[in-house]
Image (spheres, rainbow, N blue to C red):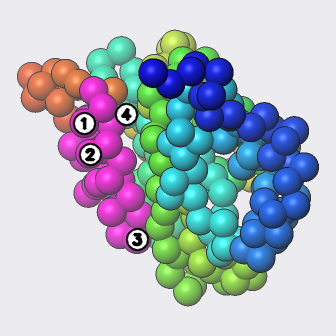
Amino acid sequence: MRDKSSKLHQPSLQEMLADPIIWMLMKSDRVDEHELRSLLKRVAADLAAGGTGMSDTESFDSSGEYRRGVGIMLLNDQNKVLVGRRSDAQDEAWQMPQGGIDDDEEPREAAFRELKEEIGTDNAQIIAESKSWLRYELPPSFRKRWDNRWRGQQQKWFVMRFQGVDSDINITREQLEFSAWKWVSIEQLPDLIISFKRQLYLDLLHEFRESGAVTGVVSAEKAGSTTTKGEGQTE
């Protein structure tokens, strides 16, 4: 019988940061120091919890070609999802709140910050998190807005339950992200989103349904209307 003392040693964050081989491999993939430390911090936390160290990073692209970001599927008490109409779009382009991750910021922190910045409130509770990073490619015209620095985005997504009331939502700000907002059914999301993000939304919905994060939401929606206007909704 194998001695328990011979169990494979799980390295700590400090040990991984001190490993020159890790630094060499990650630098060859053009990962900067902050990104490396953030990545290893998540791996160490997963190992300490008894995981494999890969659950949060197995699809993370470290080439630097994809901007790191977060997205939020915000549900109200009727299981409707909040979407906003992009202020820079000429057509009916709607999307769920999303944004980039700042330096020295974890995805969960970024999700609450972006929610506050985009809809004026972060009064919400996380009920699920995507297992991996989801990516989408940007059309050339959109890449120019970022000086062609990134070819697309890779995002961690969160399902959140809104804890406030519609009047808490305020999209008016100096740098307007949304020109209007509304609550919609989950089924509507792929049809509302701009075309180059549609596959990400389909993958996202599949994952959260498979995990049970939105179990019961679909059946509840079929019993009611597909779109709900909020008290503070802008048309």
Q: Bounds of the magenta span?
A: 185-212
Label 1 crowd (10 A; few <14 / some 14-19 / many >=20): few
Query: Where residue 210 is drawn, which disc sits there?
Result: 1
Q: In this view, does 95 lie to the left or right of 79?
A: right
Left or right of 203, for residue 8: right
CB under 8 Å between callouts 4 and 3?
Answer: no
**Disc 2, SS:** helix
The percent position of residue 109, horizontal first and vertical second, equals 71, 32
- Secondary element type, mark 4: strand
- Mark 3: few, some, or many residues within 10 Å (few <14, many ≥20)? few
Residue drawn at (50%, 25%), measured in percent from left and top? 2
Residue type (three-letter) at the residue carrying disc 4: Val
Tell me the amino acid under the disc marked 1: Glu
What amino acid is labelled 2 in the image? His
Residue under circle 2? Answer: 206
CA–CA distance between discs 1 and 4? 18 Å
Question: In terms of depth relative to the viewer, which is nearer, 58 or 91?
Answer: 58
Tell me the residue that label 4 is attached to. 81
**Is residue 174 at all visible to an observer of this figure?**
no
* The quadrant where residue 87 appears: bottom right
For marks 4 and 3 on the same chain, the one whose residue lies earlier in the sequence: 4
Q: In whole angstroms, how far apart are the C-alphas of marks 3 and 1? A: 23 Å
